[in-house]
Amino acid sequence: MFETLSHLALQQYWWVIISLLAAILVFLMFVQGGQTMIYALGKTEMERKIIVNALGRKWEFTFTTLVTFGGAFFASFPLFYSTSFGGAYWVWMLILFCFIIQAIAYEFRTKPNNFLGKRTYETFLFINGLLGTILIGTAVATFFTGSEFSVNEMNQSKWEGPFNGLELAFNFGRYATFVNLSLGLAVFFLSRVLANLYFINSVSHGKIIERSLKQLPRNAIPFLVFFLFFLVNLLLMKGFAYDPESGTVSYESFKYLHNLLQMPVVLILLLIGVALVLLGIGRTIFCFEKCSRFGIWLSGTGTILTVFSLFLVAGFNHTAFYPSIFDLQSSLTIENASSSHYTLTAMSYVSLMVPFVIAYIWWAWRAMNKTNISEKEVEEDSHSY
Amino acid sequence: MENIDFGLVDWSRAQFALTAMYHWIFVPLTLGLAFIVAIMESIYVKTGDEQWKKTTKFWMKLFGINFAIGVATGIILEFEFGTNWSNYSWFVGDIFGAPLAVEGIMAFFMESTFIAIMFFGWNKVSKKIHLMSSWLVAFGANLSALWILVANAWMQNPVGMKFNPDTARNEMQNFWDVLLSPTAINKFLHTITSGYVLAAIFVVGVSAWFLLKRKEVVFAKKSMVVAATFGLLSTIFLVGTGDESARHMAKIQPMKFAAMEALYDGQTNAPLIAIGIMEKPQDPNNPHPREFYYKIEIPNALSYMAFLSPRAFVPGINDLVNGNAKQGIPSIYEKIRQGKIAIQALKEYKAAQKINDEELAAEQLALFEKHYKYFGYGYYDNPIDLIPSVPLSFYSFHIMVILGAHFGILFIVILFLLYRKKLEQRRWVLYVALWTIPLAYIASQAGWIVAEVGRQPWVIQDLMPTLSAVSQIDKSSVQITFWLFALTFTALLIAEIKIMLSQIKKGPKDGGQ
């Protein structure tokens, strides 16, 4: 059935999958957000143990989604993989490094004789939560603001400039850096908001819930500030359009605003997404007694819809999703960066398994969350972090 | 070519080797221990014997510690294809990316979802669901290995694709050819069974330590029965797949085959060197050929191993470099010549397209396609650059094989002594079992050295050498990340070993709590 689709349709299909994976990834980064609040929310050893265990049962989902996101991007848009990863070397290396130290931290933290000590592993979790979210957000912002690279006629890419991606976050002489960082910080604070909502939903411990509720507005306000700054800039900035016939890339004023207006479904998704995020936060704060358990689901769904629609804005409607400001014509589009028709077709069949995968993840999540995480539960469990 | 920085290539290779070898310290134990744990839990569910539950939980605990660090060292490998081998990831992304994505969707999620149930679900789901989860973790882990090994096998034996000059990359023509190539099947089976053997040695060795300490005797013996049986069956399979791999390699990668036997002059009735020690080269600038101080040979065995006939001709390194008209082997010089024609024709084709000269483009394309088979050779002038390190290939191959035989014998002896109820009296066997644990790791690493060093300088056999695959970044950046990874992974390895030892010392009481 996929064979009959045009190459463009397959490219769009895969861009949707990539966008969806990215959206789920950002939602699941509540794990990262929670890791930055272990000490803010847990004042005793037991409280911290509960927090770490509440996150520890979910961290693998986030991690695996990141790995799958990388694999799927490589498979469907390999030119992005080779250009961005090989070019913005330091950004990606730092992101990876943050995740390497996360993967062992849970398992090793409380084990006796663990060489580096408990605090070191907690620091690893903190670094992962802080840098991992900010860097991923910053890197994604470059989908709109562009980077400096060139791609030659053999499709070999080269990063221009000596900083290999670090300039995207530290070149303060360029206005776009602030836009990049604002998305990074928005993702960071959003992950903390989601973590607060997750704890309120899943943990049975009065003090942790109380502190999460207190933290919630402290994270929600900076999130809103940074996100709105990014969003306003996005709507006002010139974007990178390409001509579907010739493939020529050019600047277009208000490109991303145009994309939203020309793709009303995406605009509606974005508006619903943002509204749901706010609703989740608002209902938890103002109607805590009755609505507290729903916060994570409202804001989580909202996060997924928002990120999903932002990715569609980046890649659809003849937009270069990975623009080069060094050489416009080197910019990557879903048409020039993708895998062949054959490969996309083969992978599309594999993608049919995704609903099945989501179903069993859902089932496992429910089975494990039947009872809330409490002191008693963590103590009794034969395996705890 | 003119701009290639060999320092950069070497550092990029060093970083990939470092991260891959660290990753491979942990993966084989995960692959095998997952099954051993699942088997033990099956016995528990079937018999209801609490002792088996304790045994299962003890090994599961060690599995968890090892699994975490396997995950940590694994994520970097996936992304390194892009960060350090950028040109490679475009040149083969159309083929290589697909297995990687399938791996993520099919295997990683299975593994990570059910591992949560395996660790935390003892009191939350039924016994049977828990058991099923343990088996699914084992299958998920092994399925993860399948896809990445398919990708690796494709690099050793590129099939099922066609080069598209317009996009300057290889494009997949047949998914099943890639998935079911004999190289892929052999590589997968040989690699996962090597993991099973390593895990079995690990369980047998740790159990031997308990017997030596005269602690937890029942637990140790039960563990040994399961592991040694699993290990022996795996070893038999390992030998079979290894043999098949060698035969296959003799056909598709004759240079690697010659290097791992240090065979310079090809011959019929070629003997197999069972054990050998090489001399140092007289002239450091010209390391070939390498002579032996000492060697023990098995007559005709190499010919038989390669072609199932004692009289078959096995080409040596000199035959492959200089060619052997009698045997129909083209020289490397000829391949270099053809490779250069292909590279030039591709350039001319691109140039002709720019000026819309269709006739010239078609002509150059035909020329390119005719010589594409040896495309990668065109990057070289000197055949010496196309010979892999002979001592490294030779020694790692022989270490792997000799240790493999030792493991098989050890499993038989252990099972025999357990059957005769005499294992505890033979303390020296227990010591051997304990000290075989590091040997299993050495054998396992040696296997990958044969596979990866032996195929140098190719990233993709005959088509893409490492020097044209590398990302064009500062050497100093790669040096910094190399040391960053070396330091981090070493610290994590020390932590892992210390935690493992503590857990082992605690024994299986309450499942290692």
Image (cartoon, coloured by chain):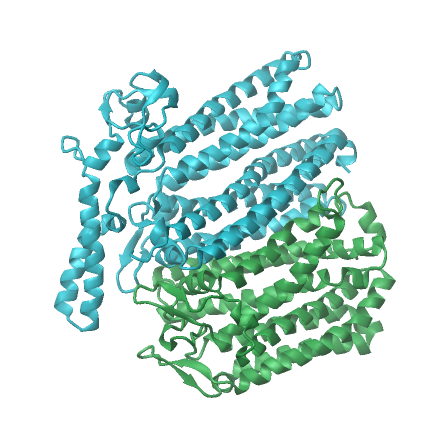
Chain colours: A green, B cyan
Counting from the top left corner in percent of width and height, residue B273 is at 35, 21
Left or right: where does residue B333 sit relative to residue A344? left
Tell which of B50 and A255 is nearer to you: A255
Q: Give the answer, above or below, for where A199 lies relative to B254.
A: below
Q: Quadrant of the N terminus of chain B?
A: bottom left
Q: Quadrant of residue A372?
A: bottom right
Counting from the top left corner in percent of width and height, residue A311 is at 52, 73
Q: How many numbered dots are placed on residues in this image?
A: 0
Q: Give the answer, above or below, for where B477 lies relative to B318.
A: below
Counting from the top left corner in percent of width and height, residue A233 is at 56, 84
Counting from the top left corner in percent of width and height, residue A342 is at 35, 60
Residue plotted at (54% across, 37% down): B28
Residue B101 in view in this figure = no
Tell which of A304 and B299 is nearer to you: B299
Q: Give the answer, above or below, for where A262 lies relative to B170.
A: below
Residue B229 in view in this figure = yes
Residue plotted at (43% across, 55% down): B98
Tell which of B126 and B491 is nearer to you: B491
Residue plotted at (31% across, 79% down): A245
Tell which of A372 and A151 is nearer to you: A151
Q: Quadrant of residue B196?
A: top right
Left or right: where does residue A119 sit relative to residue B461? right
Q: Quadrant of the C terminus of chain B?
A: top right
